[in-house]
Image (cartoon, rainbow, N blue to C red):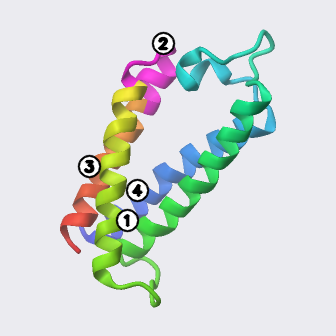
Amino acid sequence: MRETEVGVAAACLLGVVALFQFALAAGAPWGAAAYGGRAVRDDGRLPTGYRVASAGTAVVLTGALWLVLAAGAVISAAPLSANLLGVGAWVLVGLFALNTAGNLAGRHPVERWGAGGITAALTILCAWIAATR
């Protein structure tokens, strides 16, 4: 698999997760599948503080999406050096590995197996990208 294909695959997964977080921030009733299911209200939505956190997470994930596209040579990263992109990709590896552990500890099956699987895949894809920088 080429570096660009890995970058596109990682970006697609990041897009799914970012959209999920944007939906939570907008009030989607999927709160049981996020934050370990501990913050969900009776209507399935997250309280305001968690919705703000989801909005912030979505923004960070969108930045990570850009980074994997740039580090995977799918888009131009003219202002950034290859070394900086590599470091950024390794940072994502660490973040997604930690996030995988948290997701696997979640109570809801969507968080445990769905999000856990996605973040595990992102860990591997970002490691692949980082190793090629």
Q: Which residue is mark 2?
A: 107
Circle 1 crowding by C-alpha within 10 Å: few under 14, some 14–19, many from 20: many
Q: For the point 76% across and 22% down, which residue is it?
A: 45
- Amino acid type at mark 2: Arg
Residue 53, horizontal then vertical, whole percent = 66, 39
Is 32 drawn above or below residue 71 in the view shown? above
Q: Secondary structure at mark 3?
A: helix
Task: Answer above or below: position of 19 versus 86.
Answer: above
Q: Which residue sits at x=43%, y=22%?
A: 112
Quickly name the residue at label 1: 7
Q: Of the two numbered discs 3 and 2 on the same chain, state the one appearing first in sequence.
A: 2
The stretch of residues the image draws in magenta is 104-115
Rounded to the nearest angstrom, the CA distance separating label 4 from label 3 is: 9 Å
Label 3 to label 1: alpha-carbon separation: 11 Å
Question: Answer yes or no: do the residues labelled 4 and 1 have beta carbons within 8 Å?
Answer: yes
> Which mark is first along the chain, 2 or 4?
4
Residue at image coords 60%, 14%: 38
Asked if residue 48 lies left or right of residue 66, the reply is right
The residues bearing labels 4 and 2 have C-alpha atoms spaced at a distance of 25 Å
Label 4 with label 3: CB-CB less than 8 Å: no
- In the rendered image, which residue does mark 3 sit on? 124
Comes first in the chain, label 4 or label 3? 4
What's under tag 3, amino acid-wise? Ile
Q: Provide residue 93's location: percent of width, then percent of height.
A: 30, 51
Label 4–label 2 contact, CB within 8 A: no
Side of 44 where 99 appears, left or right: left
